[in-house]
Amino acid sequence: MESSLELTTSLPGTYPPLLRSRIFKIIVIGDSGVGKTCLTYRFCAGKFPDKTEATIGVDFREKVIEINGEKIKVQLWDTAGQERFRKSMVQHYYRNVHAVVFVYDVTNAASFRSLPAWIEECRQHSLGQEVPRILVGNKCDLQHALQVGTELAQKFADSHSMPLFETSAKNPDDNDHVEAIFMTVAHKLKSQKPLMLSQPPGGGGAPPLGKSEEEEEGGWSCNC
Amino acid sequence: MYLKKSKRVGASSPLNGIGKQDWDSRRKRKMGEISQALGVTPVDVAALRRMAISEGGLLTDEMRCRVWPKLLNMNTDNLPDKPAADLRENHKDYHQVLLDVRRSLRRFPPGMPDDQREGLQEELTDIILHVLDRNPQLHYYQGYHDIVVTFLLVLGERLATVLVEKLSTHHLRDFMDPTMDNTKHILNYLMPIIERVNPEVHDFMQQAEVGTIFALSWLITWFGHVLSDFRHVVRLYDFFLACHPLMPIYFAAVIVLHREEEVLDCECDMASVHHLLSQIPQDLPYETLISRAGDLFVQFPPSELAREAAQQNSQQTAASTFKDFELASAQQKPDSVLRRRRKERAETQAQAQAQAQAQAQAMVVARPRAKRLIRLAVMGLTVALGAAALAVVNTALEWAPKLDLQFFP
């Protein structure tokens, strides 16, 4: 059933190729309270959630987007931040992810210092280097409380070959920005996988992504 | 079919508005019975358990203040003073607790003035840190605050503090280990229960590889995190406080089974099934589901499921088979205190268990892979559950779910 995640039809093999819609599965991780739920909610619902609570286990949100005329389902898996949930609970959801979003809170230096542990977490779940990762610094609207400067974050992102985005899920002006971040990931995935066919069965780790060279056009360039 | 039929039963339940007069008189009678059970010396705890399980539960929060402590065998004559606030900031979990409590706005009644809610949030933080400080073996988990807030809102700070402490060292103990391995182990009971009743749903979920995390917040918050109507939450707490610590996982299974048609109509993939099941319907027929969860517990007691539960992971990852087996074996060893207590109570236990088993076996036609869920007469059920709960109150609560492996090797 590994390939079922890729298809919206429940009858793999019987659909005409044009009707298939691809699914991009993205896991969102980071310390408790950095705003993972707000970011994913902002992207999927287009607004900042009224009241959010602690995420217990894993929450799921999805949004259908269109890239170059192709409808793509973006699935966001929003995970609990508390450390005890990582070990035995969340691992199931690392399977077959196509991209990882690391989130820290720009007003909370500790959440930034935890990033290496989260990166290590990913490594332990045998996510290959080819799985795109991005770094998001959230709560940019709280400039007066800033604890993690852009320069430091950029340096860290560079050292891990990740693009950095600083944003605010709360600030309405940033609505497009949050959208743009996830769209950038989706573009990247689309360019990596010009044609995503069924994946090898039984693999516990991530599926091999497209073997073709990255298209510059769909790469990490971002104008935000 | 059984499940469809019972949906109608739920819809026409007196609690849902029809037959109100009849329910009013039964409610009045039940209030009298609860008061009577409280009035005798010693308090008739078995009767209180039956009341907490049977239709409508304990009815009012005033009753809950009086009965909940009895269900936990607690004496509340001398309540300790309000915990000192100075221990707060130094606790290792302080920041996590604060973060979660601050975000728990939805747990408070809509329309409550901000300053009142903020005062309660302070008390919530105090209770949690007080219990954690006094019990260094307990570890805070996100969701614990959802349980504590329920006790705070019903009982007030002082009574909630002592009850939550007792509950944390008993019913919730497994969730508060340093790791969530035991929590995961308890979640492993879910699929075997579903399989017994509806193999088709079970197979569908297995094929979708949905896992059991959709039920994690249900289990570790006793549904406090996912139900928006506080009346439903306290009704379930009546039930869970009166029963075996594994009852919430039976209730989780019953919710999945109640939604069998939706599940089977869903696309067979992890995301779709997870998404469907994690969105819990708010109009569940609670009384019907409670009674059905009780039926399932009597028919398929934890002892019968323990082995399968221990093997759940091995189906997913072959590499962990041995580890899981070791884990399950390790859990079979009670410490010396429990061993002594067990000996003392072995006789009572055996009787109660045998009774429940015999009852279940007499009614169950063993036909594997076929749907089988037998309705028990409500009184029979509550008596059986009340007796079972009473019999295990000093042992199973302390090391559930390992008890059952021990008794049925």
Image (tube, coloured by chain):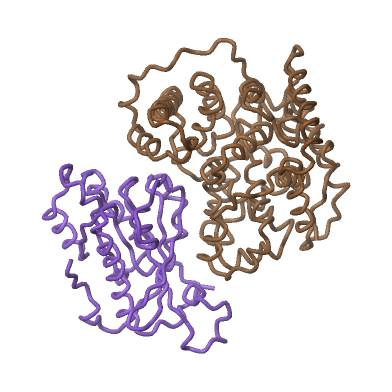
Give the residue drawn at x 25%, y 83%: A213
Q: Which chain is brown?
A: B
Q: Is residue B129 left or right of residue B294?
A: left
From this viewpoint, is residue B117 visible? yes
**Residue B323 percent location from the top left of the image:** 53, 51
Q: Nearer the viewer, residue B179 or B44?
A: B44
Return the residue found at the far front: B21
Give the residue drawn at x 60%, y 68%: B266
**Residue A155 percent location from the top left of the image:** 13, 58
Residue A171 vertical placement versus B271 (above, below): above
**Residue B124 percent location from the top left of the image:** 43, 28
Q: Quadrant of the C terminus of chain B?
A: top right
Residue B131 vertical placement versus A127 (above, below): above
Return the residue found at the far right: B362
Residue B73 vertical placement versus A98 (above, below): above
Q: Quadrant of the N terminus of chain B?
A: bottom right
Return the residue found at the far left: A151
From this viewpoint, is residue A116 visible? no
Q: Is residue B238 left or right of residue B148?
A: right
**Residue B18 percent location from the top left of the image:** 76, 44
Say which colour chain A has. purple
Give the residue drawn at x 75%, y 35%: B54
Q: Nearer the viewer, residue B400 or B117?
A: B117
Residue B49 vertical placement versus B229 (above, below): above
Q: Is residue A111 left or right of residue B265?
A: left
Q: Is residue B45 left or right of residue B236?
A: right
| The quadrant where residue B278 appears | bottom right
